[in-house]
Image: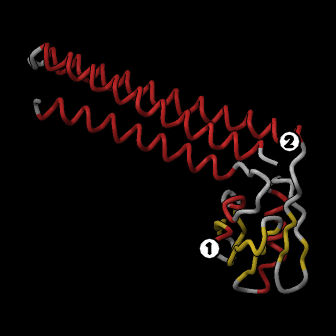
Amino acid sequence: MNEEVRFVLDEAEEGMQNALAHLDKEFQKIRAGKASPAMLDGVRVDYYGTMSPIDQISNINTPDPRQIIVQPWEKSMLGPIEKAIMAANLGFNPQNNGEVLRIAVPPLTEERRKDLVKRAKTELENAKVTIRNIRRSGIDAGKKLEKEGIPEDEIKQLEKEIQLLTDKYSEKVDKLFELKEKDIMTV
């Protein structure tokens, strides 16, 4: 296989791997009833004028499946962290005891579980669209290479390989979604 053709194929696979990794990261943010430090990933706190991720100014742990504890490295940051968690609109109400913030993770209602599955499905669709766009870009790049003199049979092989990658990664995102859906719907 020609170097340029191999490069297009490698680019496509790398893009699809990134789409899968991004989907996995997004799924971690969707809580499934069990407490997890990842639930606070999107929270940013005003740390002396700089918006910083919460995990860079505190320790976050889960002593049990229904509770998250946030322990700031500086006690003066308890208030700003509490405000940031409330502002993030995650449905949490942190309890400030002067030392740490305790966040009780309420059990999910059936309706809330269905909403979370819908959100996960939206993320799944986004990942599939990304994968299809990468496939289209790869095929377009192959057609440009063909115009530059790369043999047609190599371009056909490239298109076949890109389609195989697309099928493989589509299957992987479907499996990831099935696991997440099962996780969300398990009471």
Q: Which residue is at 21% across, 36% downward?
A: 7
Position of residue 146 relative to residue 15, above or below, is above
Position of residue 147 relative to residue 175, above or below, is above
Residue type indicated by callout 1: Gln
Q: Which residue is mark 1?
A: 56
Could you tell me which secondary element the residue under label 2 belongs to? helix
Q: Quadrant of residue 16?
A: top left
How crowded is the residue under tag 2: few (<14 C-alpha within 10 Å), some, or many (20+)? some
How crowded is the residue under tag 1: few (<14 C-alpha within 10 Å), some, or many (20+)? few
Could you tell me which secondary element the residue under label 1 belongs to? helix
Residue 59 is situated, as x and y percent measured from the top left of the image, at: 68, 78
Residue 161 is situated, as x and y percent measured from the top left of the image, at: 27, 26
Q: Are marks 1 and 2 in contact (CB under 8 Å)?
A: no
State the scheme by which the image is colored.
secondary structure
Position of residue 149 relative to residue 177, above or below, is above
How many numbered callouts? Answer: 2
The residue nearer to you, when weighing 86 against 117, is 117
Give the side of residue 83 with respect to residue 159, left or right: right
Q: Which residue is at 69% across, 39% downward?
A: 181
Residue 131 is situated, as x and y percent measured from the top left of the image, at: 45, 30
Q: Which mark is residue 112?
A: 2
The residue nearer to you, when weighing 52 against 43, is 43
Q: Which residue is at 56% across, 43% downward?
A: 23
Query: For the residues marked 1 and 2, what is the alpha-carbon distance in whole angstroms?
Result: 30 Å
Residue type indicated by callout 2: Arg
Q: Quadrant of the N terminus?
A: top left
Give the side of residue 22 with respect to residue 16, left or right: right
Q: Which mark is residue 13?
A: none
The residue nearer to you, when weighing 53 against 138, is 138
Counting residues from the start of the chain, the first of labels 1 and 2 encountered is 1
Q: Which residue is at 48% across, 42% downward?
A: 20
Residue 45 is situated, as x and y percent measured from the top left of the image, at: 72, 67
